[in-house]
Image: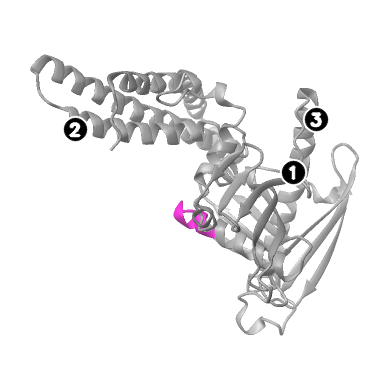
Amino acid sequence: MKKYSDSDLATLIERVDALGGYLDVSGRRDIIEELNHERLDPTFWDDPDRARTVEQRIAREQEWIDAWEALKEQAETIETLQLLAAEEGENLSDEIQAEAEALERDLEALELKSLLDDPDDERDAILTINPGAGGTESQDWAEMLYRMYARWAESHGYEMELLDHQPGDTAGIKSVSLSIAGDYAYGYLKGESGVHRLVRISPFDSESRRHTSFASVFVYPEVDDSIEVDLSAGEMELQTFRSGGKGGQNVNKVATGVRLIWNGPLSNGEEIEVVAECTEERSQLQNRNRAETMLKSRIYQAERALQEEAKAERESQKKSIEWGSQIRSYVLHPYTMVNDHRTETKVSDAQAVLDGDLDALIQAWLTHGRKDRAPAPVGTT
């Protein structure tokens, strides 16, 4: 157990207070009060969509308040134990240390979550993996990434749904798309978009030579009824094909797989082509509905990318996430290490990362360049 000095304890308590200011707890209470007043209007439920939005906003704001108040209560418990130890002369060191360890763990989790302040961060995520050039090598690497994200999602209690899975000719996968559902799934995973590089001794090389493989990961916020995406602005083509998914008797017999191809303009007039396909549902209709959700999510993300690009240009800090922008390297030979090139975060246990232990890398990316927005950890200045 880590030993907390009096100054460490004081810093922890200061961080709780600072986080309350950063989260604007008093402002959130004012928002809830204002929205509760709106709920008292007899015509409140005449507009169900607006009413649902209000109810969701109240619940979201209350969730932040409750989380911070729980931390505040933990901090007050430590202060009470310190006071009892000083006044009564009791040895409460073990109790104080245990409370401090719990407080720091919960505080770090909420500090990290507080960085997820984009409106889309709380949404579910759609994650797609495609291998780069290199045939079996890259296809195997894409499957390793799929396993990594599946393990991460499972360890955090997220629900995962396979949307599309195209197996490789010999090993691995040609492409995979999955939905990861749960609180702030997109917020935590959005930084995974980009090119991932693997260096290893190839299990497919009879001469055991070292190979470098690439695969791309794209993460989108999954749209719901609260987001309108107008598909009528462009032209959409429907293609059907025999599915290799979980369709029971229909698999490879009926054209249940669906591919939607949308060609249309973005808000800046740029014409784009967006493709989404789903093969994992039991019927063509189910696959079409799921593919349409994926299509809307990708169009929505393309619009978001336009906005982010304009913002980045204004700030002269443009960061590309297109193919060719390598974000992370996973080295398995001659040593093992994972290196995130954006934050220069290095993890020596590469196998643990490939088994789904991504939290250190995700946290580093979320906090990189935003350290002034969150309170400093214990022992830092």
x then y, percent, for residue 47: 60, 37
**Looking at the image, do the residues carrying marks 1 and 3 touch, with CB atoms under 8 Å apart?**
no
Vertical position of residue 235 compared to residue 249: above or below: above
**Disc nearest the viewer among 1 and 3:** 1
Q: Give the spatial CA distance, label 3 vs label 2.
A: 53 Å
Up the image or down, 290 lies above or below 20; here it is below
**Does dot 3 land on a helix, a strand or a loop?**
helix
Determine which residue is flagged by label 3: 310
Q: Earlier in the sequence, mark 1 or mark 3?
A: 3
The secondary structure type at the circle numbered 2 is helix
- Choose mark 3 or mark 2, whichever is in front: 2
Q: Which residue is mark 1?
A: 321
First to last magenta residue range? 150-158
Q: Which one is in front, 128 or 277?
A: 128
On the image, numbered disc 2 is attached to which residue?
94
As for residue 36 lying within the magenta part, the answer is: no
